[in-house]
């Protein structure tokens, strides 16, 4: 961790404490700037990674003409509007054209986009668009279900409201039976 980065987090934390009436020198807060710096490096590590490189284990052997589903991949991200976490699970279904990707590549792709300041709608479409670009499948569908702490902690404070988004491309967009099969298999 470079000193300039740590200094900027220290300055941010000092200003925050001053603004809210807290002492930055209190024992329990003494190491907080360093902990924040480490946390932010992890939470926002997606900016340092190219999502197009996530799907790097691509195979032509064993390509089928059937739907492949990776279900309930857990993720967390940070809301770009309130800097509060949102988290949940993402399911991906695709029908290969002439390439398939290693299963863990999809979890890595999700992490790259999730570890950025985000909104759920963009997260869902970014994942679908990257898979379409990298694998050129016959179709893809991505469904994301998440709880948003900005919804739970502020405003109306609805603790159990889940947001569900989807991105649909190719055959999934054109054929309602394909969409229905995917939705049935992930429910």
Image: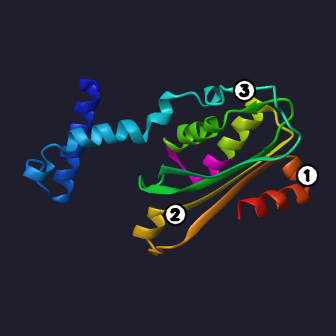
Mark 2 sits on what residue? Answer: 147
Residue drawn at x 53%, y 41% as measured from the top left: 111
148 up-or-down from 1: above or below: below
Q: Where is residue 29 in the image (x, y as percent from the top left)?
A: 15, 49
Residue 154 visible here: no
User: Contact, CB < 8 Å: mark 2 with mark 1?
Assistant: no
* Mark 3 closeness class: few <14, some 14–19, many ≥20 residues within 10 Å: some
Kindly report the distance in space between the C-alpha atoms of the residues bearing marks 1 and 3. Answer: 26 Å
Q: What element carries label 3?
A: strand
What colouring method underlies this structural image? rainbow
Q: What element carries label 2?
A: strand
Q: In this view, does 176 lie to the left or right of 90?
A: right
Mark 1 sits on what residue? Answer: 174
Q: Where is residue 64 in the image (x, y as percent from the top left)?
A: 86, 37
Q: What element carries label 1?
A: helix
* Mark 1 closeness class: few <14, some 14–19, many ≥20 residues within 10 Å: few
Q: Quadrant of the C terminus?
A: bottom right
In this picture, which residue range is highlighted in magenta? Answer: 116-124
Mark 3 sits on what residue? Answer: 58
Residue 69 visible here: yes
Residue drawn at x 30%, y 37% as measured from the top left: 38
Residue drawn at x 45%, y 63% as measured from the top left: 150
Q: Position of residue 152 (x, y in %)?
A: 44, 69
Marked residue nearer the N-terminal end (2 or 3): 3
Kindly report the distance in space between the C-alpha atoms of the residues bearing marks 2 and 1. Answer: 30 Å
Kindly report the distance in space between the C-alpha atoms of the residues bearing marks 2 and 3. Answer: 32 Å
Marked residue nearer the N-terminal end (1 or 3): 3
């Amino acid at each position: 961790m470079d000193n300039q980065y740590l200094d900027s987090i220290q300055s941010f934390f000092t200003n925050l404490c001053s603004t809210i009436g807290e002492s930055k020198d209190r024992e329990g807060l003494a190491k907080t700037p360093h902990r924040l710096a480490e946390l932010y490096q992890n939470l926002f590590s997606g900016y340092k990674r190219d999502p197009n490189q996530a799907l790097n284990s691509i195979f032509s052997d064993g390509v089928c003409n059937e739907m492949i589903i990776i279900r309930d991949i857990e993720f967390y991200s940070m809301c770009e509007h309130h800097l509060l976490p949102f988290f949940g699970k993402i399911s991906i279904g695709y029908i290969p054209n002439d390439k398939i990707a290693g299963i863990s590549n999809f979890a890595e792709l999700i992490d790259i986009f999730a570890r950025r300041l985000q909104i759920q709608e963009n997260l869902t479409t970014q994942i679908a668009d990257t898979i379409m670009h990298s694998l050129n499948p016959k179709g893809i569908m991505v469904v994301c279900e998440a709880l948003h702490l900005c919804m739970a902690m502020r405003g109306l404070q609805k603790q159990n409201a889940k947001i569900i988004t989807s991105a649909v491309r190719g055959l999934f967009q054109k054929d309602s039976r394909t969409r229905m099969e995917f939705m049935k298999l992930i429910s």
